[in-house]
């Protein structure tokens, strides 16, 4: 059985300075960045094999996934 955890995420309210910094990073890296906020977020530190598994699942499902440490 799998445990499902649903948290409320909100898109961040960004100042012009923050938007400019993100825009510059997007241009430099050639990617789109999405900003969201959640108090107490700790991203999981995945090894190479786990990253490969998550990427394969993203491709299979057509989704973007974010790995977080469980509480």
Image (cartoon, rainbow, N blue to C red):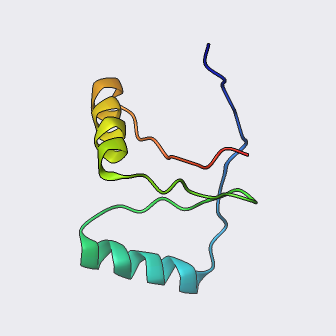
Locate the N terminus by quadrant: top right
Frontmost residue, 1 versus 30: 1
Q: Is residue 70 left or right of residue 66?
A: right
29 vs 17, nearest the viewer:
29
Residue 48 sits above or below residue 22 on the image:
above
In this rendering, is residue 36 above or below 50? below
- Where residue 35 sits, quadrant-wise, is bottom right
Q: In this view, does 12 lie to the left or right of 25?
A: right
Tell me residue 27's x, y (percent): 28, 75
Give the residue displayed 63% in from the left and 79% down from the top.
15
Q: In this view, does 14 lie to the left or right of 24?
A: right
Relative placement, left or right, of 44 versus 50 is: right
Q: Position of residue 71 (x, y in %)?
A: 74, 46
Specify the farthest residue to the bottom: 17
Residue drawn 74% across the image and 59% down it: 40
Q: Where is residue 29 in the image (x, y as percent from the top left)?
A: 26, 73
Q: Nearer the viewer, residue 35 or 3?
A: 3
Q: Position of residue 20 (x, y in %)?
A: 46, 82
Single out the residue that lies furthest toward the top. 1
At x 66% / y 25%, what residue is drawn? 4
Q: Residue at x 45, y 76 (%)?
A: 22
């Amino acid at each position: 059985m799998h445990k499902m955890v649903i948290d409320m995420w909100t898109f961040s309210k960004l100042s012009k300075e923050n938007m400019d910094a993100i825009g510059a990073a997007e241009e430099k890296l050639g990617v789109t960045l999405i900003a969201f906020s959640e108090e107490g977020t700790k991203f999981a530190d995945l090894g190479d094999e786990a990253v490969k598994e998550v990427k394969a699942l993203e491709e299979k499902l057509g989704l973007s996934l974010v790995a977080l440490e469980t509480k």
